[in-house]
Image: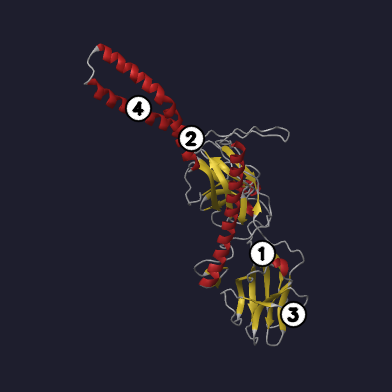
Amino acid sequence: MRIAMYGVIGIRISKHGAEQCSGVAGASSAYYGKLIGKLSELEHGVSGEVYAVDARTLFIKDFTYDGEGPAAWFYAGHSKSVGTNGFKVRDERGTFDLLRRYRKKDITLMLPEGKTLANIKWFSVYCDDYAVNFGDVKIPRNFDYPRPQKLGQLSGIHGVSSEPVVIVDAQTLLIPSFTYDGEAPDAKFWVGAGLSPTPQGIKLPNENGEVGPLRRYDHKTIVLSLPDDLTVHQIGHFGVWCEAFAVDFGHVKIPHSLNVPPSLKMLGVSPQTVARGGQGQDLSTQSQQQQQQQQQQQQQLLLQQQQQQQQQQQQQQYQQYQRPTTYRPQLQRRQSVQIVPALDYTAQHHQLRANVQDDGDYQGDYQRRSGAAAAAAASPATTISRQARARFRFQQQQPANAARPQQQTAYRLQY
């Protein structure tokens, strides 16, 4: 009864404990991308299954070639017939060396720069010297190769939000502009079968590989990886889950059979020799770097696109709330504008300065004349007569002193 119950609800026992499986047919089978077809077995024992990893990458499962051909290379082209106007494709080591002997090897090839599966019609093992096709596969018209897929946005309690979640490949998730207040006691990134989170789900490490409670995030773009051999084809949702109190903080649904690229780990691309079913594959450093650079470029491109969208949104919000620094009334065509001439403060300043200077000169002259006459006149009558003469002299000098500032002002303006 217990075994039957496990079979019904889909529980898997592993070294990590009980984990709920997706229940999808073929979920446990290996994933190499989208199948293009099998190589035609024409000459020298050529065989293998060709998969599309992404727009420029091919994966050949169990590739076989006896190595006896005189001058064989990997070829691709956009012509109708194989060999006409084709171009060479580097081998799994990133070289154009003659193909050696292969026996059920898994290899990863990359098309040259500027070439994609959208503009080629065939791929083959081709003898350049004798123009002989050893085996080929045709690329279907309008072939839908794997590519990153966008999901919905995270939205829930504790401020959980994000922009649309991106499935970069079968084991990598990109969460742009992720926000969470960090106040919950035991929040985790969470995946599992079904359309909504349950306690039987699987917790994901954060962007730093840690599995503890989530800290506070403020519009941060993060990249998460599914653990071990788990892929997006085995899960039905992704979200933020409080493990202690079994509360869903927000999640997005993951459709089944997403047409996304496989991860590099699923293709056996690693720094060391990868054992797959007893067949070891030795990849050179150059080929490994090409695969890693391609994945990094895809992730960086997605990050740049998300950052540009954030900047555009912030700029739009700023423009909505931006206020003008000065008031500029809008005038209609029929409204007249009054023009007021500016005052000549410079001329007035020179005139006032000349008046003050003339008054100072008059007072000094008056004091000098008064001091000289004081010794000769000591009687009251003389004093009264002196004051009368002073007033008379002031009245005579007043018009001359008043005309002088105007002459000086006119002179300075002409200058």
User: Amino acid under label 2?
Assistant: Ala
Distance of mark 1 from mark 4, alpha carbons? 101 Å
User: Which residue corresponds to mark 1?
Assistant: 55
- Does residue 402 appear left or right of residue 257 in this picture? left
Evaluate whether residue 266 shows in this view: yes
Q: Earlier in the sequence, mark 1 or mark 4?
A: 1
Where is residue 272 drawn, in percent x and y?
49, 68
Question: Please, which colouring scheme is shown?
Answer: secondary structure
Name the residue rendered at 68%, 57% in the picture: 259
Q: Viewer-nearest of labels 2 and 3?
A: 2
Q: Viewer-nearest of labels 3 and 4?
A: 4
- Does residue 256 appear left or right of residue 216 in this picture? right
Residue extending farthest to the top is 380
The circle on residue 362 is 4
User: Which residue corresponds to mark 3?
Assistant: 84
Distance of mark 4 from mark 2, alpha carbons? 23 Å
Q: Viewer-nearest of labels 1 and 4?
A: 4
Residue 26 lies in what quarter of the image?
A: bottom right
Front-most of 18 and 120?
120
Q: Which of marks 3 and 1 is nearer the N terminus?
A: 1
Q: Earlier in the sequence, mark 3 or mark 4?
A: 3
User: Which residue corresponds to mark 2?
Assistant: 347
Name the residue rendered at 56%, 51% in the picture: 13
Where is residue 295 drawn, in percent x and y?
57, 61
